[in-house]
Image (cartoon, helix red, strand yellow):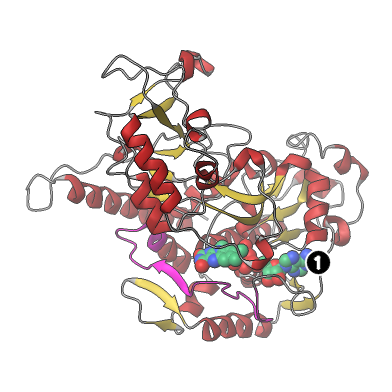
Amino acid sequence: MKPVHVVGGGLAGSEAAWALANAGVPVVLHEMRPLVKTDAHHTEKFAELVCSNSFRSDDWRGNAVGLLHEEMRRLGSLVMASAGPAQVPAGSALAVDRDVFSDAVTAALVAHPLITVEREEIKSLDQLLSVIPDARSAIRDPGANDALYDPLGPGSTALRASGRDDESIIFATGPLTSPSLADSIRNLTGEDSLAFFDAIAPIVHADSIDFDIAWKQSRYDKEGPGGDKAAYVNCPMDEVQYVAFINALNAGAKTEFKEWEKNTPYFEGCLPIEVMAERGLDTLRFGPMKPVGLLDPRVGKRAHAVVQLRQDNKLGTLFNIVGFQTKLKYGAQEEIFRMIPGLQNARFARLGGIHRNTFLNSPKLLDGTLRLRAEPRVRFAGQVTGVEGYVESAAMGMMAGRFAAAERLGRAIEPPPATTALGALIAHVTGGHIAGGKGSFQPMNVNFGLFPEIAAPTHGADGKKLKGEERGRAKKLAMAERALQDLNSWLTAA
Ligand code: FAD
């Protein structure tokens, strides 16, 4: 059997190689370190943790990332298996000694009889593929190949018939994908499809917005698709509140750019909110906080300034704060953004940030099994697909490896149900959840807002009525229990 090539020995590439090899499929794992370095990695080890040593909460009952840990363990994750013995005390979080952890991952991969390691930089997508002219012609029309390559079928019938099914590559090159490979990806997928900025605006859980203050309305009541004139959530500010807010933005603690980030210019179109605030008291009032075309229904007039939130997922459980990309420190963000009337009790699914990042416009470019629609011999995995975080990246590597193995072995590919953490992440990157269409896709950590709704229990096991936070906890537990039950059924059926 010809090997599957996995490019990048980070969190995702390590999991992908492990999943493939354990399914009996030979793998060549290409890693450019130590020959070519990145700005964040310091070693030549696989699955190096570039910053924090934490995989975050390990509690599957109350936390979406803890649930993802548990699901990955049930699927034989190398990252989770290597984290256990490397664990250091960190309360309910799973934190590790980074060297012990990466050494364990490296040793397992190197010792596997079906894995060959090549230390080299892969500079272009087709370095590992034979050149196929008809695939090139479809590149600017993603989806043109959909009829040819049944995305969820047993193997790819048309691909096999064309004699090209023995080539399969998983790119798991991460947020710091080497520049020449990034250029090659951009050439293949189109100029606007590979972002080099992570311009993240904070995202809040819809059920934490106070609708006694906020209201839904589109600017000038402009109709959206389906005649909706109330697509946005609006939070009003009077003059005193606005001035206090601008002062807080100016005084708030900011994250410093790393040396290598300093050369990355801001796009004028996605300036951090605090940079705009610095430009003058009214800059934001004439920018993302402009109040025109919006009428506060409580007072029947226009507010001094308005913060708008836009639906972030199809389920309507998450809303992002429009234009609020920021480099404020996390603590400062929570404090300052809760000054916004209507968001005083906001729970954040993700906080804002800007740093260099390379990620695909995956909902447009990838099919349901993480294959490039225009070139189905190529899969992507990890942070480059638009997830955020070590665990999420590893999870997407594991899934890409399982999909590629099933394809190679001619088995049916059935992605995990969207009610599981793994399925929810896949739905996020492949477009199942996107509400805003083109351009709205942003990387995200796993969180319960990505899961389909579930009726929150109203009473505890003791028959007592649940209140506020208790009810929220019970809802998370119900979602987590549903996830593990559905994961087990999916595993049994596979
Ligand atoms: P990586 O782990 O980066 O692996 C990609 C691998 O591909 C690397 O080994 C790289 O050397 C290799 N590679 C790249 N290009 C090529 C090529 N052309 N040919 C061959 N090999 C190549 N997440 C957290 O959860 N916690 C944090 O604290 C955290 N801090 C971060 C700090 C920074 C500076 C950055 C950039 C990201 C951080 N992240 C963090 C986000 C993310 O979780 C990590 O980047 C994570 O390592 C991503 O996993 P990955 O497998 O997709 O990529």
416 vs 406, left or right, is: left
132 or 57, which lies in front? 57
> Which quadrant would the N terminus be assigned to in this image?
bottom right
Q: Which residues are magenta?
A: 41-67
Position of 298 relative to 85 (above/below): above
Residue 249 in the image: state x and y as whole percent: 43, 47
In percent of the image, x 58 and y 72: which residue is there? 50
Residue for badge 1: 2
Our reading of the magenta stretch's main secondary structure is: loop
Please give the name of the residue rendered at 31% of the width and 54% of the height, measured from the top-left corner. 481
Question: Residue type at mark 1?
Answer: Lys
Residue at image point 26% right, 39% down:
455
Left or right side of 388 for 111: right
Q: Position of residue 347 (x, y in %)?
A: 33, 47
As drawn, the residue found furthest toward the front would be 280
- The magenta stretch spans residue 50: yes
**How many numbered markers are drawn?**
1
117 relative position to 341: left or right:
right
Residue 453 shown in magenta: no
Depth check, front residue: 26 or 317: 317
Task: From the top left corner, tell me how far across and down residue 261 is, in percent.
Answer: 66, 61
> Is residue 481 or residue 349 the one in the foreground?
349
Q: Residue at x 52, y 28 (%)?
A: 286
